[in-house]
Amino acid sequence: MLDCTLDKENAIVVVRPESPLDRNDFVELGKLVDPQIEAGGDLAGLIIDAARFPGWDSFGALVTHIRFIHEHHKHVKKIAVVTDSRLGDFAEHLAAHFVSAEIRKFHAGDVVEAQRWITGEA
């Protein structure tokens, strides 16, 4: 399950993976972000708030996730990965090769600092 919220004022999406991700998680995320992108252009940022990454419930969910990234990455200016997991370091470096957004890792719990970075207040 993926808990998703949208701060419309700042055009920031916060996602919190709570259990292995499934295909429907990305359908629901699309329902949240697509209208924002259509109405206001790009998202200022995406915050991935995950003390640990739970993985995917199937190969199909992984493929759906990759497809979602491919279809949306050009519409996100900054990505903040908020975690103390080693996967956060890996994601920060690997994702930089596949997405156009600026990516930065923050320690677990530093969601407010990540928001400040995205809005330019940091």
Image (tube, rainbow, N blue to C red):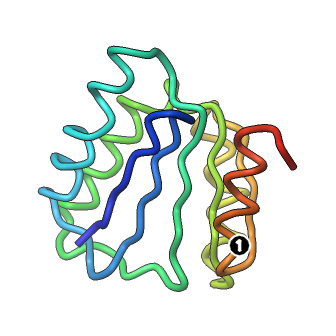
Q: Residue at x 72, y 39 (%)?
A: 119
Residue 112 spot, x, y in % from top left = 68, 63
Q: Report the front residue among 109 and 68.
A: 109
Q: Residue at x 58, y 37 (%)?
A: 99
Kind of residue indicated by mark 1: Asp
Residue 16: image quadrant is bottom left
Q: Is residue 46 above or below residue 89?
A: above
Residue that badge 1 annotates: 110
On the image, the x and y values in percent for residue 64 come to 23, 49
Circle 1 packing at 10 Å, graded few (<14), some (14-19), many (20+), is some
Residue in view at x 63 percent, y 77 percent: 83
Q: At x 46% / y 15%, what residue is drawn? A: 41
Going by the image, does 20 lie left or right of 58?
Answer: right
Can you say whether 10 is above or below 65 in the image?
above
Instruction: Judge by depth and name the residue closer to the eye, 9 or 97.
Output: 9
Estimate the x, y position of residue 80 in percent, counting from the top left: 65, 55
Percent coordinates x, y for residue 96 in the rendering: 69, 45
Q: Secondary structure at mark 1?
A: loop
- In the displayed structure image, the side of residue 2 where residue 22 appears, left or right: left
The answer to which image quadrant residue 17 occupies is bottom left
Total labels drawn: 1
- Furthest residue toward left: 24
Quadrant including the N terminus: bottom left
**Foreground residue, 97 or 79?**
79
